[in-house]
């Protein structure tokens, strides 16, 4: 499977609205994960304090969407699949992550064609992250 940076068009970052919009999307994503009971299982895999997760996903997504490489500048190659190996990710976790991000995009009023395109790219990356058979 291709590395995440190759899965989206280079201009998705601008189409979304730049850094402020990426930050708002990440905040909506983690707010939903934190507050919605249906994401409690996904939430339980994450640290008690989500501030570091928010920053890292924001930095990563800027580059993944075709914007500035904040994550790579700080941490080098994302090695995202390897970094997720400590967390059991099966179909259930993948689908919860994608549902949470889908709701965050609706919350942030990402326009329909872009939302569709990003949902497909997220789905590819999230599926590639699976490290446990079955649900
Ligand atoms: C498929 C289900 C997924 C689960 C269950 C999951 C879970 C987690 C957890 C528990 C962490 C650790 C949080 C922390 O270090 O603060 C993490 C980190 C991270 N996740 Fe995910 N994740 C998933 C998918 C994704 C996807 C699809 C992306 C990107 C599109 C992503 C990007 C990141 C990034 C950038 C980090 C920080 C890595 C680091 O530098 O330590 N994750 N994820």
Image (tube, rainbow, N blue to C red):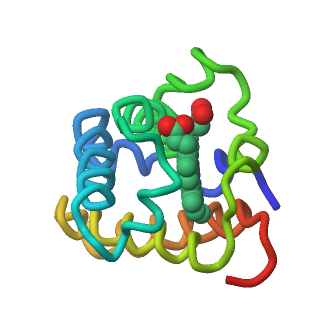
Residue at 78% x, 70% y: name it.
Answer: 132
Residue 10 in percent (x, y) is at: 53, 46
Extreme residue toward the bottom, this view: 134
In which quarter of the view is residue 39 placed? bottom left
Whether residue 76 appears in this view of the structure is: yes
Residue at 73% x, 28% y: name it.
Answer: 77
Residue at 64% x, 61% y: name it.
Answer: 125
Extreme residue toward the top, this view: 74
Residue 60 in percent (x, y) is at: 52, 36
Side of 135 where 17 appears, left or right = left
Side of 67 where 125 appears, left or right = right
Question: Who is closer to the viewer here, 3 or 97?
Answer: 97
**The N terminus sits in image quarter:** bottom right
In which quarter of the view is residue 53 placed? top left
Side of 127 where 58 appears, left or right = left
Q: Work out whether 90 lies above or below 128.
A: below
Residue at 64% x, 79% y: name it.
Answer: 91
Residue 75 in percent (x, y) is at: 64, 20
Question: Who is closer to the viewer here, 36 or 12?
Answer: 36
Q: Work out whether 75 lies above or below 61.
A: above
């Amino acid at each position: 499977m291709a590395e995440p940076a190759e899965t989206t068009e280079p201009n998705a970052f601008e189409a979304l609205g730049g850094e402020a919009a990426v930050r708002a999307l990440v905040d909506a994503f983690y707010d939903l994960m934190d507050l919605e009971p249906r994401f409690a299982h996904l939430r339980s895999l994450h640290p008690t304090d989500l501030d570091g997760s928010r920053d890292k996903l924001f930095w990563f997504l800027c580059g993944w969407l075709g914007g500035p490489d904040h994550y790579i500048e700080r941490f080098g190659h994302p090695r995202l699949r390897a970094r997720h190996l400590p967390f059991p990710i099966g179909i259930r976790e993948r689908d919860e992550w994608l549902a949470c991000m889908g709701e965050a995009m609706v919350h942030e009023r990402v326009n329909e064609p872009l939302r569709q395109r990003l949902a497909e790219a997220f789905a590819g990356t999230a599926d590639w992250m699976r490290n446990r058979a079955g649900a």
